[in-house]
Amino acid sequence: MKRVPEKEVMDEPEGAAAYARADFSGVNQAFVGAFLAAHPSAARGTVVDLGCGPADIPLRLAQAAPACRVTAVDASEPMLAIARQALAKAEAGSRVTLLCGYLPGLPLPPHSFDAVVSNSLLHQLPDPAAFWGEVKRLVRPGGAVFVMDLFRPASDAEARRIVEAAAADADPLLKEDFYNSLKAAFSLEEVAVQLADAGLPLAPRQASERHLTVSGVL
Ligand SMILES: C[S@@+](CC[C@H](N)C(=O)[O-])C[C@H]1O[C@@H](n2cnc3c(N)ncnc32)[C@H](O)[C@@H]1O
């Protein structure tokens, strides 16, 4: 199936609120568990989350790893307003710093993080090289990368099937967003080429029927 890019920054308040209302707790907790299992020393380090959305993953990470300091970055101010409220309600929220910034060109010094993580940002970007370039720029030598995203199904029918299997009872608007995200996602082969082009010695791995992960040390 041909890739159909979707809207990049989620800067409409209604869209950001609908996204934040959706229950991604299972996937997000699994993300944190898999990241810490693959890179245990990151639990005591500095981590940047690219495209953090409502900051559910940064908060779960700060809760699971109290010695970890997390910087959570997003270009959407409405999304960050929701994140700010969530962090204010949780004790671990004080260990998460929010930053409004557009990628590439984030106002963060090079090689300043022990780990770079990101969930569901890559597929939203018109230019994936911008994403991998920023990952490479931000992680310190010997630091960890842990990225998860959807991968594009083989056909439109398969995309519809995945939406029904994973989100049958979800808000119709969110189901349509999910379907559009699957169509905008990259294939494993495309991500492998992106990583090689960026000079990153990493490989994508299929993690579920709809997710891929890229995990390793630079
Ligand atoms: C699908 S959401 C994922 C949010 C979060 N990582 C999660 O797992 O729930 C993608 C987020 O990336 C942000 N985003 C998209 N393009 C961006 C860019 N170029 N720079 C910074 N943030 C971006 C969007 O505003 C949105 O909040």
Image (spheres, helix red, strand yellow):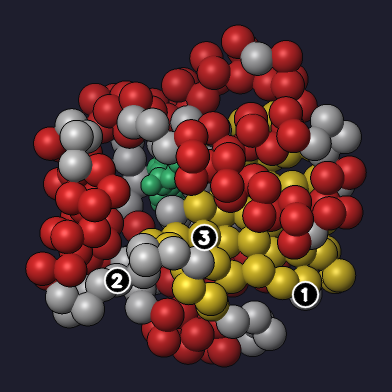
**Residue type marked 2:** Arg
Residue behind mark 1: 218
Visible residue check, residue 202: yes
Q: Viewer-proximal residue, 12 or 117?
A: 117
Whichever of callouts 3 and 1 sits on the residue coming sooner in the sequence is 3
Q: Residues within 10 Å of mark 2 (few under 14, many from 20)?
A: many
**Residue type marked 1:** Leu
Q: Viewer-proximal residue, 130 or 115?
A: 115
Question: How far, Cα to Cα, is label 2 from label 1?
Answer: 26 Å
**Comparing marks 3 and 1, which lies closer to the viewer?**
3
Give coordinates of residue 66: x percent, y percent: 83, 30
Q: In what quadrant of the picture does the C terminus appear?
A: bottom right
Q: Is residue 155 left or right of residue 56?
A: left
**Comparing marks 2 and 1, which lies closer to the viewer?**
2
Q: Quadrant of residue 90?
A: top right
Dot label at residue 152: 2
The answer to whether the residue labelled 3 contacts the one labelled 1, judged by CB atoms less than 8 Å apart, is no
Question: How far, Cα to Cα, is label 3 from label 1?
Answer: 17 Å
Q: Residue at x 64, y 33 (%)?
A: 60
Q: Secondary structure at mark 3?
A: strand
Give coordinates of residue 74: x percent, y percent: 50, 41
Outermost residue toward the top? 89
Give coordinates of residue 194: x percent, y percent: 49, 82
